Structure formats: structure tokens, C-alpha cells
Image (cartoon, rainbow, N blue to C red):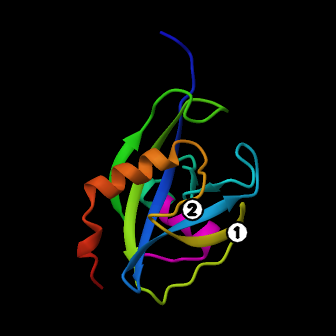
């Protein structure tokens, strides 16, 4: 048996509807890898931390958005998706109302809402994760 460590991360896919557009929340990374590139809010699960708790913590730490829960979407674990080590990320999604504001904190250099039709270049495999979410979730049914 190989002795290789696998890390677990969480990613939050946060949507909001405004003026008939669906927007997606992204953070600009402050640190390598992919420094200054846009990414989903998220990060490493702490030792002895539940993944459902970790995604809410990471979302709040990076964007100051405090939610009670998110829906688990899927795990993404292709080798080399993170250039540092083998990382499995559990993606979650949720919807917020148009009034919800975000502000950058922790290791997020900036936060912004992007139209799902006009996304910037993304870190890691986050475009794949977002596309999976968009194919799985009917964003036309967003209601508050």
C-alpha cells in the first residue's frame, strides 16, 4: 500500500438572481497557487471538522457571507487538479437573495459577482465544477 496523503477541501458555489441574470460569487486568490486568479470560495477542511461545517466556515472567512446550510453537489478528485498535492474537493451550492453583499477577507484578495455567461479565467478545475453545477441545477427555478 502506498503512503500518500490526500487532502480534503470544500468549494462553495453561490448563486443570486438579479435583473433576470444569474450571478455567481467568486473570490480572487491572494496566495499561490493561482495567485490573483478567480476561484470559488473554499479551502481545506480542518482536522476533526465536519465538511458541512467547513464549507460554511470557508465561505464566511473569505466572503463574510453567513449561511446556515448549503446543498452538497459532488466530490471532485482527479489527480493533479491541485498542483500542490492530491486534493479531493467536495462542492456545495446555494442561493442568496439579491440584497446579499460580499466582502473579501482571509485569503481572498477580492470578491465579485459574475454573470454565469461571462466568467473570468478560473483557478484549479473550478470551471468544470461550475459547469457541472449548472447542468445539475435548474437556475431558472431560483426562488427566495
Q: Residue at x 61, y 47 (%)?
A: 123
Which percent across, then down, holds residue 25?
52, 68
Q: Residue at x 58, y 42 (%)?
A: 124
Q: Say which mark, if any, is on residue 12.
A: none
Q: Nearer the viewer, residue 140 or 75?
A: 140
Verify whether residue 47 appears in magenta: no
Q: Is residue 69 visible?
A: no
Q: Say which mark, if any, is on residue 58.
A: 2
- Between disc 2 and disc 1, the foreground one is 1
| 33 left or right, relative to 24 | right
Q: Is residue 107 visible?
A: yes
What distance separates the C-alpha of mark 2 from that of mark 1? 15 Å
Total marks shown come to: 2
Verify whether residue 59 appears in magenta: yes
Q: Main secondary structure of the magenta part?
A: helix
Which percent across, then down, holds residue 60?
57, 71
Q: Residues within 10 Å of mark 2 (few under 14, many from 20)?
A: many
Mark 2 or mark 1: whose residue is earlier in sequence: 2
Q: Secondary structure at mark 1?
A: strand
Vertical comparison of 141 with 125: above or below: below
Q: Nearer the viewer, residue 74 or 37?
A: 37
The C terminus lies in quadrant: bottom left
| 22 left or right, relative to 26 | left
Which percent across, then down, holds residue 129?
43, 48
Q: Are marks 2 and 1 in contact (CB under 8 Å)?
A: no
Vertical comparison of 122 with 7: above or below: below
Check the image and name the residue furthest to the top.
1
Q: Residue at x 29, y 69 (%)?
A: 139
Please report the bounds of the magenta region as a residue range.
55-68
Q: Residue at x 44, y 61 (%)?
A: 13
Which percent across, then down, holds residue 58?
57, 62
Q: Which residue is mark 1?
A: 110
Amino acid at each position: 500500500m502506498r503512503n500518500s496523503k490526500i487532502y480534503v477541501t470544500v468549494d462553495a458555489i453561490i448563486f443570486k438572481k438579479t435583473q433576470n441574470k444569474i450571478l455567481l460569487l467568486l473570490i480572487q486568490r491572494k496566495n499561490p497557487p493561482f495567485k490573483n486568479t478567480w476561484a470559488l470560495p473554499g479551502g481545506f477542511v480542518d482536522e476533526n471538522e465536519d465538511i458541512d461545517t467547513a464549507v460554511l466556515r470557508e465561505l464566511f472567512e473569505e466572503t463574510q457571507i453567513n449561511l446556515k446550510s448549503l446543498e452538497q453537489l459532488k466530490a471532485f478528485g482527479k489527480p493533479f487538479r491541485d498542483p500542490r498535492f492530491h486534493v479531493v474537493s467536495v462542492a456545495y451550492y446555494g442561493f442568496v437573495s439579491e440584497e446579499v453583499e460580499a466582502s473579501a477577507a482571509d485569503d481572498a484578495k477580492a470578491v465579485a459577482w459574475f454573470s454565469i455567461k461571462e466568467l473570468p479565467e478560473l483557478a484549479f478545475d473550478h470551471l468544470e465544477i461550475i459547469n457541472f453545477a449548472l447542468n445539475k441545477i435548474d437556475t431558472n427555478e431560483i426562488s427566495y
